[in-house]
Image (tube, helix red, strand yellow):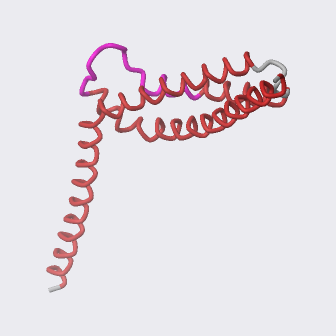
Amino acid sequence: MAEAIGLVASAIAIAEASIKLSQALFQISETVIAARKELEALASELVLFASVLESIGDALEAGQGLHSGEMLRTAEQVFHRCGTEFEEIRNEINLPIGRSIATWDRLRWTFQKPKAERLKASLECSKTALMLMLQTLCLATSLQGLRCV
């Protein structure tokens, strides 16, 4: 009788492990299938972010004398951090440009995605800080224009 109970407990444990494994495999499968779309979305977001960086650079250049040295130092730190994170994302993904994504690369994306998502979230924080700087510079420029009138 005790052997039967032990056998049933073993069967239940194996069944639970099988269910967990199948769930993990389905999740990996979904990630592999969606890899192309996810990578394209990430690339689009990075292009948008690059345009924000260009806008900030243009605004800093146009607003000479309207910003403090502290703002310039902060912007420089954020730019440096962004550059480092862009480089980390590029190294993490490391896919040749202009070709379809091979199955192996899609599978690799399953393991790279969490780090890329973390870096993307950090870039979003940087983008928010830079957008606030951009708005401050635009406001200062507008106020400066009103003083001249």
Question: Any magenta on residue 96?
Answer: yes
In this rendering, position of residue 50 left or right of residue 34:
right
Q: Is residue 142 above or below residue 118?
A: above
In this rendering, position of residue 41 left or right of residue 70:
left
Q: Quadrant of residue 140?
A: top right
Give the quadrant of the C terminus.
top right
Q: Quadrant of residue 69?
A: top right
Q: Is residue 108 above or below residue 83?
A: below
Foreground pick, 133 / 32: 133
Q: Residue at 83%, 30% (x, y): give it.
A: 70
Q: Residue at 49%, 26% (x, y): give it.
A: 48
Q: Residue at 54%, 22% (x, y): give it.
A: 51
Residue 111 rendering spot, x and y as whole percentages: 38, 38
Foreground pick, 145 / 61: 145
Question: Any magenta on residue 28?
Answer: no
Q: Quadrant of residue 52?
A: top right
In this rendering, position of residue 19 left or right of residue 46:
left
Residue 4 rendering spot, x and y as whole percentages: 14, 80
Residue 56 rendering spot, x and y as whole percentages: 65, 24
Q: Which residues are magenta?
A: 85-103
